[in-house]
Image (spheres, helix red, strand yellow):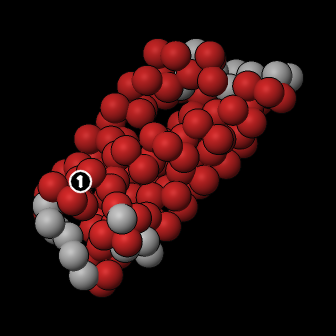
Amino acid sequence: MPFFLLWGFLVWLGASLIFRVLGQVFFIPDNTLLMVSSYILVIPLILVLTFPIYKFKKIQKNSDRMKAAMCIALPGMLIDAIVLIYFDQVFVNLSVDTDRFFASWLMWAYSLILLTGFFNTKKLEG
């Protein structure tokens, strides 16, 4: 499972860098369409970041897939628990008013990662 912890850290790092640089593009509370889109568009992104990795690492058993999903989500969840305390200093391009939307979006994304552990990818493939 160390591979999945590393993968989770890299996913967190990539996403954090994107939001550090371009967060103001994704989180505009006054733009409902954009905000809803950011929640919807993360669904296929999470699927692309998880299912191919499960297949690549030949994760077959349900229990192993659940463990892998937890290991992918865990680094980001732990780090973001601290990062969100310093939201205004870390994500300087985002308005302080967007912190709750950002935290909500993170919980949604981490929940999606965890949910991928419940799906049997063999059944999804055909």
Q: Residue at 58% of width from left, 36% of height from top?
A: 41
103 up-or-down from 95: above or below: below
**Residue 96 percent location from the top left of the image:** 70, 27
The image quadrant where one finds the N terminus is bottom left
Tell me which amino acid carries mark 1. Answer: Ile
Is 83 left or right of 56, judged from the image as shown? right
- Can the viewer see residue 81? no
**Residue 113 percent location from the top left of the image:** 45, 58
- Can the viewer see residue 118? yes
Q: Nearer the viewer, residue 88 or 52?
A: 52
Q: Nearer the viewer, residue 57 or 124?
A: 124
Q: Nearer the viewer, residue 55 or 46?
A: 55
Q: Secondary structure at mark 1?
A: helix
**Residue 123 percent location from the top left of the image:** 37, 71
28 up-or-down from 38: above or below: above
Q: Residue furthest front?
A: 126
Dot 1 corresponds to which residue?
53
Q: Residue at 80% of width from left, 27% of height from top?
A: 33
Is 35 left or right of 16, judged from the image as shown? right
106 up-or-down from 31: above or below: below
